[in-house]
Amino acid sequence: MSEKFKIFAQFVKDLSSETKDLETYLYVKEYLKNYNLNIEISSKPMKNRFVEVNTKLTYLDNGQNSKKSFFEIIYTTIIQIDETIKEKKEIEKIILCDVQNKIYLNLEKVFINLLHSSGYPGAKIEKKIDFEKLYSQRFN
């Protein structure tokens, strides 16, 4: 393995779009720009230095109104970490930054397709996620 890790599989583990009724749909269509993207990354070690990395994107309205839709994807990546990588901090960086940088374009494409297929054709993610910056902020 010339890289620090190798990706063996990527797939959508869970996908959710919930809009209660027409009134909520029409409201959300107008105010979708107020929704915020949240990201959570978790991992689970497997045998032979394989790791299951789950990246969860949630798009939601943090306001107080009752007319809300809910959008979420859990995108799973199965990686194998090179046997020369031993330090916990380096493995953490691989999971939180390196893997995310490799998969994010595909994950974002699938998530935007979910929004478009849910009836919000103009939906887009304005801000690009800087995984390196998020990682370094964890220690400050």
Image (cartoon, rainbow, N blue to C red):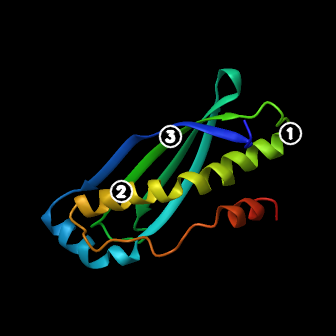
In x, y percent, where is residue 110?
Answer: 38, 54
Residue neighbourhood size for the residue with mark 2, other residues' Cα within 10 Å, grouped as few (<14), some (14–19), many (≥20): some
Q: Residue at x 73, y 43 (%)?
A: 3
The residues bearing labels 1 and 2 have C-alpha atoms spaced at a distance of: 36 Å
Quarter holding the N terminus is top right
Residue 116 locus on image (x, y percent): 26, 63
The residue closer to the viewer here, 78 or 59, is: 78
Q: In which quarter of the image is the C terminus?
A: bottom right
Instruction: For mark 2, give the secondary structure.
Output: strand
- Please tell me which of labels 1 and 3 falls first in the chain: 3
Q: Which residue is drawn at 33% across and 48% down?
A: 16
Q: Would you place residue 96 above or below residue 65 in this image?
A: above
Q: Which residue position is annotated with label 3? A: 76
32 lies above or below 77: below
Q: How crowded is mark 1: few (under 14 residues within 10 Å), some or many (20 or more)?
A: few
**For residue 119, side relative to residue 115 (left or right):** left
Residue type at tag 1: Glu
The quarter of the picture where residue 128 lies is: bottom right
Q: Marks 2 and 3: in contact by CB < 8 Å?
A: no
Q: Mark number for residue 71? A: 2
Circle 1 is placed at which residue position? 87
